[in-house]
Amino acid sequence: MLNIKEVIKSVNATISKNSNKYYSSVVVRGTSKPNYNNGINQPKICSLNHGQCKQFYIKSAEKDIWESTCPFGFTVSKKSFNTASNYGRISIFSLVDFLKLNDIETRLSGLPRKQKPLKQDIIKELNSFNFDRESHVNNKNYVHGLLETLLIGRVGLTIQSISHQFFTPLQGAMSDVKNIENSIDVVESSQRLSTNFRALNKLATEIQLILSVSEELNYNMLRRVTVHNMVSEIFELLQASANEKHVRLVQSYNHGAKSVDAIPAQLNIVLSNIISNAVKYSYNGTNENMLEVKVDYKTTDDHLIIKVINEGCKITEEEIEDRLIFNLTYRGDYSGDRQRPGSGSGLYISEQIVKSHGGSIDVKSSFCGGLVQCGTDRYRNVFYINWPIIVEE
């Protein structure tokens, strides 16, 4: 699956290829101004860090769709796209038209001393421009379409991967219904059917969240949720998987409030994703030495901190500091070391839910045993879910 860096690289390659005719730039969060054509054949005035240009681009910062004429005559068009990653929104800036101004020399009068020798070359280049607006608008639309297609492709591949996960609980549910109809193992089949329905509902909600264009929380759906009860239910669903790996599921009933405001289905997704990941990526214990997946709690004045702890594969410093593990479709550097399946969507969805409730997720990964040189290193991974006790509008 394409990650965001690859998406940006692909779009930039197209922009550079057409740099002899058109002017576009991919701008990510934290970039102050566009670097048209990645600096290749960029208009000389755009290469300068001119004060008027900086002020001009600041005006576009909060706008997703924007078009305006810059101080030196270029009509600048901007469109932003949601990346569903820690990159936030990516913007495409394009020069789509040009109007020759009579006072360019005056506007360039305040150039710093080191840039003054460039003044006549800049004026000469500006006087030589002859834009075909229709052609430049068509190129702008092409670049927009390319970026949008690649971003939609990422989401589509993720949904496709999640959809494949429907098969097991759906097949199980159909088998359970048939057993109940034929009065075979009715009690056990009814229990399994309930479990399979919960799994299907969770997957359906995840797809709905990925497709949702609104990141606003629906406050009318908030309820008071007792977190440790929800965790106990999740433990029941994961018990068989944990037993296979000789992993003990442990919940610490330490003091403090464990009830929070939340949309119940969404909090369940967060806890299910992170706890099931802790089981999935835990190393195997033995009958004599079982490992643990532990959920612990701590309260501050206004937050409940839910800690999910396991001993498993390493999460690198880069993955934590750059929050790569929370990108849509991203799978950790060490996540595939034992052919574990996954769509790379769980942590992305979980973080979006936590953030929409006014909380945050932090991660720590520290070496706790084994021999690194032998490839048997084991890491203690802790996910800190900082959830507000009361969610206020």
Image: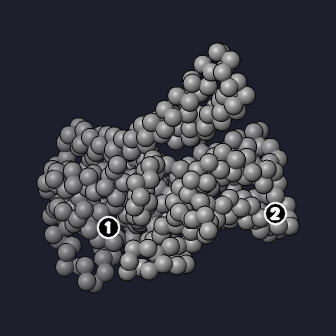
Q: Residue 283 placed where, x, y %?
A: 52, 64
Residue 253, labelled with which disc?
2
Residue at mark 1:
107
Q: Residue at x 56, y 57 (%)?
A: 245
Q: Nearer the viewer, residue 21 or 8?
A: 8
Q: Residue 100 placed where, x, y %?
A: 24, 53
Note whether residue 322 is visible.
no
The label nearer to you, 1 versus 2, is 2
Type of amino acid under label 1: Arg
Type of amino acid under label 2: Tyr
Please identify the residue farthest to the bottom as the structure is shown.
113
* Left or right: residue 314 compared with residue 203: left
Note whether residue 32 is visible.
yes
Local SS, label 2: loop
Q: CA distance from mark 1 to mark 2?
A: 69 Å
Q: Residue 179 placed where, x, y %?
A: 62, 21
Residue 136, labelled with which disc?
none
Q: Residue 198 placed where, x, y %?
A: 65, 36
Q: Nearer the viewer, residue 347 or 145?
A: 347
**Display coloring:** one colour
Q: Please say if 219 is above or below 196.
A: below
